[in-house]
Amino acid sequence: MERIGYGEHISNAVENMPYECVIQTEDIAKKLAAEFELPYDKAKVLTNVKLKRMADKGEIERVQRGVYCHIKQTVFGKVTPSIDEIVIKTLKIQDDKRIGYESGASLLNRLGLSTLLPRDIEITTNRYGAKLPEGCRIVTCKPAVTVTDENWKLLQFIDLVSELPNSHIDAENPEQLLRQYAKKQQLDTLMLIYTARKYYSPKVLIPLIDLFMEVEYEVTSG
C-alpha cells in the first residue's frame, strides 16, 4: 500500500475531526511529525501551509493564527461553530490535556450562586497571554499555578471560594451550594486545603477552611 503524502495526511486528519472540534496547527503538526518522523518545526511549516490553502479554498474557516474550524453547508448558507466556543476550547484543552477552566461571574451564574449574567466569559488558563480574536466575549486570567488534568478542579473550586466576598451573590445559602458542588466533583477536603496553602494567600486559605469546618461543627454538635 502506497504511503500518503504530507498534504493528504493533514487533510485526512482535519476531515476525521468532528464538526465541533477545534483545528489547531500545533496539534496536527505534532501528529504529522510523529507519523513521518519529521522535525516538529518542519511539520509545523507544512501544516500551516496546508491549512491556509484549505481555508483559502473555503474548506475550513480561519479563526485566528493557528486556529481553524469546520464549515457546514446548509440551506441557509455557510455555518461554523461560534468564535467563543472555539476559543474557549483552545484555552481549556491543549494536546488533549487540561490547561484551563471557567471561572469568575459566568461560573457563579452557571452554578446558581448568582443570577447576574455577565457579558464576558472568564477563563483561567495557562494561555492567559494568548491574543484573542476581535469580537469574542472572553477574558483570560492567570492561574495560581500551572493548570493540569490533576489540579484544575481543585484550583477552580478554590477560586470560587476566594471570589465570593467580592462577587454578586444572591443565592440563599452559597456555602451549602459550594459544599454540595465539592461533593459532586469528588473534591478531597485535605487536597483543597493543601493546594490553597501552597499556592494561594492566607486570605484564601482561611475562608476555605471555614467553609468545611462549619459543616463539621454542625455534625459534631448535632
Image (cartoon, rainbow, N blue to C red):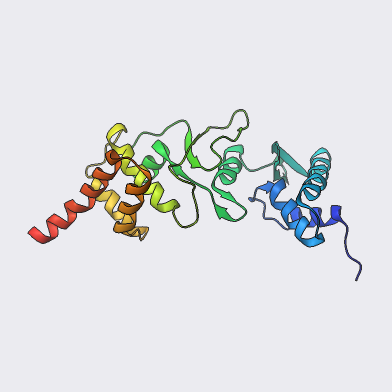
x then y, percent, for residue 47: 79, 47
In the image, taking residue 63 as reference, residue 181 lies left or right, namely left
What residue is rendered at 59% in x and 40% in y?
Answer: 87
Query: How many numbered tags mark residues here?
Result: 0
Q: Relative to 130, does residue 222 appear above or below in the rendering?
A: below
218 and 21: which is toward the camera: 218
Place residue 151 in its image quadrant.
bottom left
Place residue 67 in its image quadrant.
top right
Direction right: furthest residue = 2
In the image, taking residue 153 as reference, residue 189 lies left or right, namely left
x then y, percent, for residue 161: 31, 43
Place residue 62 in its image quadrant.
top right
What residue is rendered at 59% in x and 28% in y?
Answer: 135
Direction front: furthest residue = 198
x then y, percent, for residue 101: 47, 46
x then y, percent, for residue 115: 34, 37
Direction top: furthest residue = 134
Q: Relative to 127, does residue 31 appear above or below in the rendering?
A: below
For the C terminus, the image quarter is bottom left
47 and 180: which is toward the camera: 47
In the image, taking residue 93 as reference, residue 18 lies left or right, namely right
Direction left: furthest residue = 221
What residue is rendered at 70% in x and 48% in y?
Answer: 26
144 and 119: which is toward the camera: 144
For the N terminus, the image quarter is bottom right
* One can see residue 125 in this view: yes
* One can see residue 76 in this view: no
